[in-house]
Image (cartoon, rainbow, N blue to C red):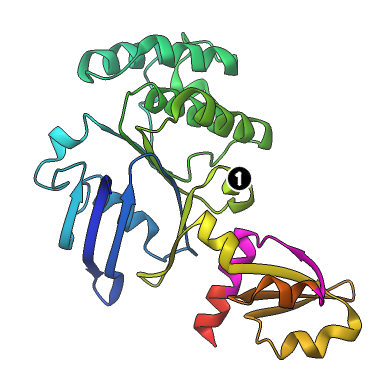
Amino acid sequence: MDAVIKAKDLRKSYRKTQALNDVSLEVERGRIVGLIGPNGAGKTTLLRALTGLLRVDGDLDVLGQHPWSERVKLMRDVAFIADTATLPKWARINQILTYTEAVHPNFSRKRAENFLKQTGIDTSRRIKTLSKGMKVQVHLALVMAIDASLLVLDEPTLGLDILFRKTFYTNLLNDYFDENRTIIVSTHQIEEIEHILTDVVFINQGRIMLDSSMDDINARYATVAVKRDNVEAARKLKPIQENVLLGQHVFLFEGVPAEKLQSLGEVSPTRVADLFTAKMQEKQA
């Protein structure tokens, strides 16, 4: 296993809040991992720990480096987009490109300019004249132009309309991702990234609730739109969730053989958002 990230028993507290509570996970090279959780679950704390912005207790190795003590070396191979990222309002875009080219050895100005060309943003404009969505796109262009082994995205498309969100993820797959790069993305827009994920990690109240590949999820979970006459039979198989949509009973099952489900109704793959909701409700029960 070629693990890019090795984390064991990570802990971080803020006064009375346990932001990370014995978090352990490994991420292999060449994976796209969705980090999913409600607000305040510990997602940003974990991402900041991975990129050396925050000291945490426990054992942590990222690309063979300790993020906190070896951050300067680590960040040559890591790119990070935070949802709170800001750019200097007084600067022109081309000035920022020049500066980034001078300070980062793995930055490609040509790649950044090509990305911006697709958005139609004039690089002579000052940051203060840009809309929120435009500022996000400039920051995306800067980070995606860095030849990084690990790309960490914290709500990367916040402020973008649906067209640019789709364009961003298409560019991420076609122009950036390959078997030597690893991407971790945290977002509330689960439906928009589900098709690109290889793995998902659910986190809540500082604890990992689920750490699984998409292949395992598809093999382990199933959603069934159950025929009315089969509702009681479906309940006997102990679904982890039951919903009624427009009079149709929809059940989510875990670990039930496919042959037992097919006679109940229409079987379909489980969406990540539905599985996340079920796991959160299961925790609260």
Position of 145 relative to 94 (above/below) = below
Asked if residue 55 can be seen in this view, the reply is: no
Residue drawn 69% across the image and 71% down it: 258
Amino acid on which the number 1 mark rests in the picture: His
Judging by the rendered image, the residue that carries numbered circle 1 is: 195
| Residue 217 picture location, percent across and down | 55, 62
Residue drawn 62% across the image and 80% down it: 240
| Residue 218 picture location, percent across and down | 59, 60
Residue drawn 22% across the image and 64% down it: 8
Q: Quadrant of the C terminus?
A: bottom right
Q: Is residue 65 left or right of residue 249?
A: left
Nearer to me, 238 or 122: 238
User: Could you say whether the residue bearing mark 1 is in a helix, strand or loop?
Assistant: helix
The answer to which image quadrant residue 117 occupies is: top right
Instruction: Kindly give the residue lying farthest to the left in the view shown.
Output: 69
Residue 65 belongs to magenta span: no
The magenta stretch spans which residues? 263-278
| Residue 86 picture location, percent across and down | 38, 34
| Residue 49 picture location, percent across and down | 24, 53
Asked if residue 37 can be seen in this view, the reply is: yes
Q: In this view, does 147 lie to the left or right of 260?
A: left
Instruction: Kindly give the residue lying farthest to the front in the view shown.
Output: 259
Q: In this view, does 76 lie to the left or right of 157?
A: left
Nearer to me, 211 or 142: 211
Q: Is residue 99 left or right of residue 185?
A: left
